[in-house]
Image (cartoon, rainbow, N blue to C red):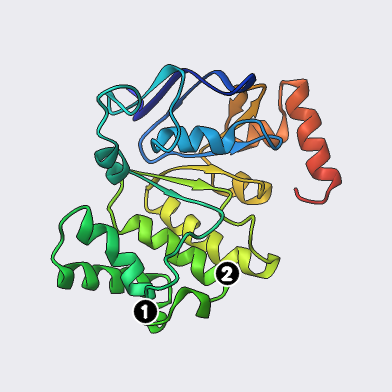
Amino acid sequence: MAMIEIRDVKKSYGQVKILDGLSMNVDEHQVVCLIGPSGCGKSTLLRCMNGLEQIQGGEIRIHGDRMTGPGVDVNALRRDVGIVFQSYNLFPHMRVVENVMLAPTKVLGQNPAEAEARALSLLKRIGLEHRATAYPDQLSGGQQQRVAIVRALAMGPMVLLLDEITSALDPELVSEVLNIVRDLAEEGMTMLLATHEMGFAREVASKICFLYGGKVHEEGPPSQIFGDPTQERTRAFLQRIIEAGRL
């Protein structure tokens, strides 16, 4: 059985259908990259998986347990399913180490000393232990995004959702964030990434899912999707990416 099962998920805003019967599976340790044109539902799907949006049909399960619908413990869900956004969402009045410690102490009930030690260990891992006492606005965008990633990791999630995490960064800062994701992939972290970084998706993904019309229009390994897509919509999308010099 797949670690995550997404079945016939529907989500609309008013009369606009964003997800229209979307189905897909994610296996444990798999890195799935969601690609597709703006408005195809990549970010909406991730937000539904983390309980930030409510679906209007279908279901999402993790290890057989429902992630959506009545009776779901949203706080428990968010302990298991971390999410990182393109805007870093760090608390500006809190130092870096305090940002990373906050959820483990408040949600998991960790001892502050234990949470601080864990936070400093994570910051050392991304080369930012020397910035532990800085405030977010004293960091570069790339540094802030790396802190946002380790803040999610501090909860020990089973799954990490990454929503266009490099979109707000200057090009020279993108690589330092993608290096963190690459390391996590190599360590076996189960991840879903909504991304426009096609070269990176081709390198790091176990599976590529091309979203179109609120559904998974085509899916497969990167070699197949980027090298020999079977669907005309996929081919047209990738051709535009190539013409824009992004693949």
Instruction: Give the residue drawn at x 42%, y 66%.
Output: 91
Residue 244 in picture, x, y percent from top left:
83, 48
Residue 71 in picture, x, y percent from top left:
25, 25
Instruction: Give the residue drawn at x 44%, y 78%.
Output: 135
Q: Quadrant of residue 213?
A: top right
Q: Quadrant of residue 75?
A: top left
- Label 2 – label 1 distance at C-alpha: 15 Å
Query: SS of the residue at dot 2?
Result: helix
Relative to 158, is 53 on the left or the right? Answer: right
Instruction: Please say if 179 is above or below 94.
Output: above
Residue 118 in picture, x, y percent from top left:
24, 68
Q: Amino acid at mark 1?
A: Ala
Is the N terminus in the top left, top right, bottom left or bottom right quadrant? top left
Instruction: Please say if 206 is above or below 136.
Output: above
The front one of 94 and 139 is: 94
Relative to 219, is 55 on the left or the right? Answer: left
The front one of 57 and 29 is: 57
Q: Which residue is mark 1?
A: 132
**Which of marks 1 and 2 precedes in the sequence?**
1
Residues marked 2 and 1 touching at CB (< 8 Å): no
Q: Amino acid at mark 2?
A: Gly
Residue 170 in picture, x, y percent from top left:
68, 66
Q: Which residue is mark 2?
A: 141
Q: Residues within 10 Å of mark 1 (few under 14, many from 20)?
A: some
Q: Is residue 158 visible?
A: no
